[in-house]
Image (spheres, rainbow, N blue to C red):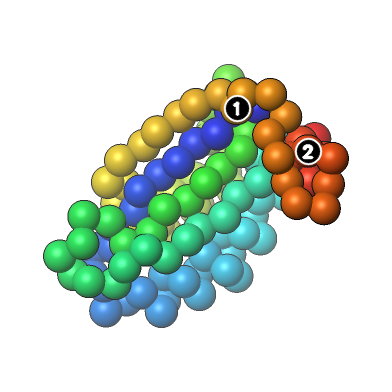
Amino acid sequence: MEIIIHKIRLLDVGRAPAFEEWVTTEDYAACPDLPSVRQFSVQRVSLDPAAPFHYFEVIAVTSMADFERDMALPAFCRLVDRFSAMAELAEEVIGTRLGAGYGANSRNVADAMGS
């Protein structure tokens, strides 16, 4: 499983409530339409306008090749359009999970993520 971490910088921190509403009602809701996505979450870091980034997202995907195919889907393109109107990527990190990992109350992270 591949893990993608995006550091996100808002174009206008005053629009943070609109961004968070979009994440929780539209961005999360679109995940079932992206077959490669196994887990996705966005975390708030800071709303200080001078912060190097304001949020980060963690995306667990079946593979980068699968995710790249999903990036051509209309559902993904709609997400990119809306995201780009509110924010920009400050940094991207991609890696491969070592082993199954750990998840509380489950045998391992793979079980917790439904893999």
What is the x, y in percent for residue 30?
64, 55
Please say whether residue 113 is visible from this viewpoint: no
Q: Residue at x 43, y 49 (%)?
A: 80
Please say whether residue 111 is visible from this viewpoint: yes
Instruction: For label 1, count other residues whose C-alpha is less than 10 Å away and answer few (under 14), some (14-19) or many (20+).
Output: few
The circle on residue 108 is 2
What is the x, y in percent for residue 101?
68, 34
Q: Residue at x 65, y 27 (%)?
A: 1
Q: Is residue 6 left or right of residue 110?
A: left
- For the residues labelled 2 and 1, the Cα–Cα distance comes to 12 Å
Name of the residue lying farthest toward the top? 65
For marks 2 and 1 on the same chain, the one whose residue lies earlier in the sequence:
1
Instruction: For label 2, count other residues whose C-alpha is less than 10 Å away and answer few (under 14), some (14-19) or many (20+).
Output: some
Nearer the observer, 66 or 75: 66
Q: Residue at x 36, y 37 (%)?
A: 92
Name of the residue lying farthest toward the left? 50
Task: Report the amino acid beneath label 2.
Answer: Asn
Q: Is residue 92 left or right of residue 64?
A: left
Q: Which residue is mark 1?
A: 97
Task: Report the amino acid beneath label 1.
Answer: Arg
What is the x, y in percent for residue 74?
57, 44
Q: Is 100 rendered above or below residue 47? A: above
Q: Is residue 94 left or right of residue 106?
A: left
Give the secondary structure at mark 1. loop
